[in-house]
Image (cartoon, rainbow, N blue to C red):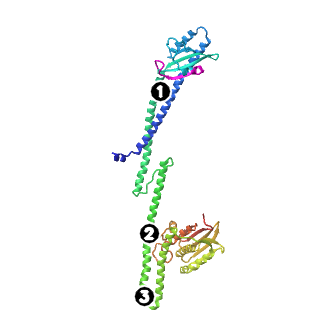
Amino acid sequence: MKKRLKRMKIKYFYQQIISHISVIVVAFLVLSLLFTQYMERIVYENKADELITYGENILWEFDRTLFGRENILNQYYHVLNDRDILFAVFDDKSTILYAGDWFITKDRLTEREWNLLKSGKIVEVRQDLKRFEQDVSLVALPYFKNGVFLGGILLISPISGTREMISEMNQFLSIAVLIALAASLLLSSLLSYIHVKRITRIRKATSLVASGDYSVHLPSSTFDEIGELSNDFNQMVKKLNDSMEEIKSLENRRRQFMSDVSHELRTPLTTIRGVIEGLNNDMIPEEKKEKGIQLVSQETNRLIRLVNENLDYDKIRSNQVKLYKVDIQLSEVMEIIKEQLQFQADEKNNQIMVDVQEDLIVHADYDRLIQILINITKNSIQFTEDGTIYLRGKSADKETVIEIEDTGIGIDPQEVEKIWDRFYRADISRKTNPYGEFGLGLSIVKQLVLLHNGSIKVTSEKGKGTKFVIRFPLLNKK
C-alpha cells in the first residue's frame, strides 16, 4: 500500500486547481468569519444604541414632567411594546417605580452593574441568556439630578429578531460564497489548462531534443516565467544545434587532417626508408650519399615540425604556456623575419618589404612574437607568387599595431573566419609544401595573440590579397 502511495502521481492540472481552490476556500472562510463577526457586532451595537436612545428620551420626559408621568410612561410603554422592547424605571434603592404590565423584580441588576450606574456609566449587555425568560439585549441608564443618583431605567429587547437577521445575512453570504467558488473553479480550470498546455508543449519539445531533434522552436514571450523559459529553451536548442554543427565540422576537418597527416607522413617516411635501405645496401653512389643524408634530415624535420605544432597547440589551449613579456624593438624583429624567410620568398619570386618606425616598441614575449610573425608571413608567402609581402608597424592609443599584407590569391569571404579553426586548410589539395601544410599555424597564432591580451583580424579579397592586423597592448590588462 505504501509503495502504491509513493508511486501515485497527481497531474499538474489538478495540482493547480486544488491549490487555487484551496487558497480561495481558505480566504472565503476567513473573510466570512470576519464579516459575520463584524456584522453581528454592528447589529448588536445598533440595537444597544436604539435602546439607549429610547432610554434617554424616557428619562428626559420623566425628568421634565412632574404631573402625569405615568401617562407619558404608558404611552412609551405601548409604543415600545409594539417593537418588542420593555422598560422599567427604578429608584436608587432598586425599587421598581414603573414597569407597565411587565412583571420585574428589583434584583435583575448585578452588584457590578449597580456600581457602574452609580458612577454615571451606562450598562450594556448584548446577549443575556439567564435573567429573563428569553434571550435579550439589555441596557440600563442612570438617572441623576443635581449630581445626585436617583435611580435609572432598564430596557430589554429579545435577540431572536437579531439572530434571524444575522442568520439571513449568513445565508446570503453562503450563497455568495458558493457562486464565487463556482466562478473561481471555472476560471481556475481555464488558467490551469492554459498553463498545463504551455508546459506540456515544453515537455514534448524537450523529448524531441533528447531524441536528437535540434530544429525544435517554441512560441516565446516575456509575459511570464513560462514565456521566459521558452526563450531560454530556444536559446539552448540554438546553442546545441550550433554545437552539433561545429562538432560535425570539426569531425570533418579531423578526418581531413588525419588523411592529410597520413599522406604527409607516408611521403617522408617512404623517402627516409628508401635512403636508409640504399645506404645499408650500398645502392647509392658515393657522390650522392651526402645528398641522400640531407634529404633524410629535411624529411625528419618535417615530421618533427608536425609533432611540435600539435603539442604547441594543445599547450596553448590548456594555458600551459608561460609568457615572459618585455619591451621589444619591432624594427629589429621585422628584419629578423625578413632575413629568415627571404629564401622561401625568393623561391616564389616574392619581395618582403618592411615599413616600421625605428623606435616603435611592442610589449610581448620575444619567442612567441617571432613565432606569430613567422607563421603569418609564411602563410602569406605560401599563397603569393610574383608578389609582395608587406611587414608594417605603427603605434596607436596604448597599443602597437602590426600589419602583414600580401598581394596573393586571397581567401573566399565565406572561408575567412574558418582559417582560425584547427585542422583547417584553405588549400585542400595535397601537394607537398613545407609551410603551414598541417592547418595548425594560424590556430596557434590566434591563441598566442589572445594570450598576449591582444587581438587579430584578417581581411581578404579573392585574387587581390590578404591583410592581417595584430594589436598588442603596451601594458598588461588587469
The one of 221 and 175 positioned closer to us in this rendering? 175
The one of 118 and 39 positioned closer to us in this rendering? 118
Secondary structure under the numbered disc 3 in the rendered image: helix
Q: What's the residue type where badge 3 is placed?
A: Leu
Residue 199: numbered disc: none
Farthest residue toward the bottom? 286
Secondary structure under the numbered disc 1 in the rendered image: helix
Marks 1, 3: nearer the viewer: 1
- Which residue is labeled 1 in the image? 169
**Disc 2 residue crowd, few under 14, some 14–19, many 20+, Cα 10 Å:** some
Q: Is residue 100 left or right of residue 185?
A: right
What is the x, y in percent for residue 453?
58, 66
Q: Which residues are magenta?
A: 115-134
Measured Cα–Cα span from mark 3 to mark 2: 37 Å
What is the x, y in percent for residue 317?
51, 68
Q: Is residue 387 left or right of residue 166?
A: right
Q: Quadrant of residue 456?
A: bottom right
- Which residue is labeled 3 in the image? 279
39 to 222, vertically: above or below:
above
Image quadrant containing the N terminus: top left
